[in-house]
Amino acid sequence: MHKREAIMKRAIYPGSFDPVTNGHMDIIRRSANIVDELYVGVLNNSAKNSLFSAEERVSMLEEMTADLPNVHIVSFDGLLVDFARKIHATIIIRGLRAVTDFEYELQIAQTNHVEYDQIETIFLTSSLQYSYLSSTIVKEFAAYGGDISHFVPTQLIDRIYQKYGIEKGEHHHEQ
Ligand code: PNS
């Protein structure tokens, strides 16, 4: 009994979060209910062109998870397994949207497990209404002034449009 109580389950939910979507938020909330501590790991990859800097992505996620006391936002670079080891996380959380995600995710999960045998990947199936959603699609829509209000947290809408030089009120949603 005592032994069981002492085990704290710490997980990492890694991703680019460029920008964080309602689909990501759904996975964050649901996994925060399953594990004791959830670290959201923002990949800070200088080789990858991102719309938002790692600092911006971290602060947006901090704002969006302020009401979740067991969620911590961190950025990392290098290998995910190395970072997981460093923060003593034993679980990697990933969201699965459709069958198209499966092969790639399986490959990563299996490789990560070989690299670090203490780590297990847990997949949460995305809620149905987010199964089509991706940060890439959000950016594509936003770039053309399309309505992104169903895809991302309301507080972030204007920040995303601003990256494309679209000012408040100019985009579809507000017209
Ligand atoms: O949100 P994304 O872009 O699908 O997240 C991908 C991510 C960050 C989980 C993945 O690219 C990753 O873990 N990168 C860190 C480098 C690494 O460990 N690579 C090995 C697995 S591909």
Image: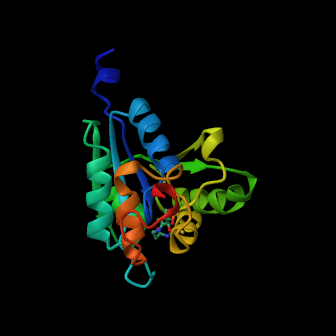
| Residue closer to the observer: 62 or 72 | 62
- Can residue 119 be seen in this snapshot? yes
- Which residue is farthest top? 1
- Position in image of residue 87 (x %, y %): 28, 54
- Position in image of residue 30 (x %, y %): 46, 35
* 72 to 111, vertically: above or below: above
- Position in image of residue 126 (x %, y %): 60, 43
On the rendered structure, is 72 left or right of 105? left
Task: Specify the quadrant that holds the N terminus.
Answer: top left
* 158 to 121, vertically: above or below: below
How many marks the image carries: the answer is 0
On the rendered structure, is 7 left or right of 128? left
Q: Quadrant of residue 49?
A: bottom left
The residue positioned 36% from the left and 57% from the top of the image is 156
The residue positioned 29% from the left and 60% from the top of the image is 58
- Which residue is farthest bottom? 47
- Position in image of residue 149 (x %, y %): 49, 52
Q: Quadrant of residue 60?
A: bottom left
- Can residue 120 be seen in this snapshot? no
Colouring chosen for the image of the structure = rainbow
| Residue closer to the observer: 18 or 88 | 18
Q: Quadrant of residue 70?
A: top left
| Residue closer to the observer: 36 or 115 | 36
- Which residue is farthest right? 99
The residue positioned 30% from the left and 21% from the top of the image is 5
The residue positioned 47% from the left and 65% from the top of the image is 171
* 100 to 145, vertically: above or below: above
